[in-house]
Image: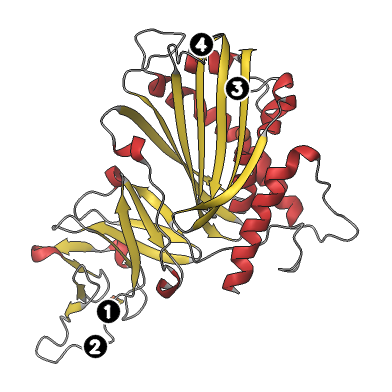
Amino acid sequence: MGADDRSSVNIMIHNAWYAAGLSVDFEVEKLEKRTICEKAMVLWRSAEGEVVAHDDRCCHKRMPVSAGRFLEGGVLECPYHGLCFDSTGACVKIPSAPDAPIPKRARLLPFTVREKDGVVWVWPGDPDAIGDIEPIDTPEIASPDWDTIHGDLFVKGNSVLMVENVLDLTHFYPLHGNSIGQYADTQIDFEVETGEIGGSGFVRTSRDVDSYPQSEGFQDLLIHEVADSSSSQTVIGPGVLIAKRTNWPAGGRAKNEDPKELVNYHLFAPHDRASHKYTYVVNMPKNQMCGSDPNKRGVDRAKEFFPSVFEEDVWAIEMQQKMCEVPNGDYAEVNLATDLALVRGRKMLFDLYDKEA
Ligand code: FES
Ligand SMILES: [Fe+2]
């Protein structure tokens, strides 16, 4: 399985913004561990409110400082020999040599962090490669006018497989045939668009249908049983896919009558080439209720409903991953006409990977 073999997805892209979590996940002086692109990181929000990320290996003898504790003055104490670090990663105290000068190299190596619109992003690669690449805008997550829920899944599969899964609605039947998918959905026409957002490439598919009977899952989440519906999936770089859907009652599109909206951010952070953390963030306009219970917010229904749907995706991705590890031999994937967005998405990601190499 060579890196030049585009029928396998054994790639990992370091130079990208990956979500370490949502802002609400980072409390002041609460230690969080992440592994992103094989980099073991410790993250915390400093007393000043800034989220910082550093190499989790203590510069002394590799003890993970994420197992340490904070002392007076916001310094992090390593639990092995007690070296202390400030939020810049600099060593500020060595208990066994209190009067000796602290070596300059005694520090935790930093990673670049950006917190924006309620998301904490980390760049695990070369900081010089950031240039004008911006983390995406996620206005719904930050806005008081939207309800948001989120959750994490750890997936034993390359993150490219999950990017492709979420970009590809033709798997809604049969994989999600008991929830959000129906057979007819696989035949809906779609458009594919490519371009650039915030310094990153994107590939988008979009679908518009009118007077279209909705699956049971979407009837519950977005109310209208037969709907005019617009949906899009936009993959931006290796770590983000935005899925949007608006459903109107049949015939309601032109007048924008009673729109029901759903914006899902699917955030992928590679752990290594064979696994990743998948964070889903579901957003609906504030107090948009669900179909099955007029007193329940749509996002609360989504919190009950989506994890089992996403587990179906995880099941598929983990099976694919095992097959990606079987040597190719004469095997080659077949791309169907409906795989156009996947082909473009995979090319975009392989181009990023090649550029980095
Ligand atoms: S390993 Fe951290 S102080 Fe020794
Ligand atoms: Fe899926």
| Residue count near mark 2 (Cα–Cα under 10 Å), binned few <14, some 14–19, many ≥20 | few
Q: Is residue 202 visible?
A: no
Q: From the viewer's perspective, is the residue at label 4 or at label 2 nearer?
A: 4
The residue at which mark 2 appears reads as 104
Instruction: Estimate the spatial distance between the alpha carbons at disc 2 and disc 3, rounded to whole Å.
Output: 56 Å
| 87 shown above or below 338 | below
Instruction: Estimate the spatial distance between the alpha carbons at disc 4 and disc 1, rounded to whole Å.
Output: 60 Å
Q: Quadrant of ligand 2?
A: top right
Q: Are marks 2 and 3 in contact (CB under 8 Å)?
A: no
Q: From the viewer's perspective, is the residue at label 2 or at label 3 nearer?
A: 3
**Which residue occupies 73% across, 44% down?**
340
Q: From the viewer's perspective, is the residue at label 1 or at label 3 nearer?
A: 3
Under mark 3, the amino acid is: Ile
User: Element type at marker 2?
Assistant: loop
| Residue 318 % position (x, y) | 66, 46
Under mark 2, the amino acid is: Lys
User: Element type at marker 1?
Assistant: loop
The residue at which mark 4 appears reads as 252
Given residues 39 and 183, the one toward you in this image is 183
Q: Is residue 340 left or right of residue 89?
A: right
Q: Are marks 1 and 2 in contact (CB under 8 Å)?
A: yes
| Residue count near mark 1 (Cα–Cα under 10 Å), binned few <14, some 14–19, many ≥20 | many
Under mark 1, the amino acid is: Arg
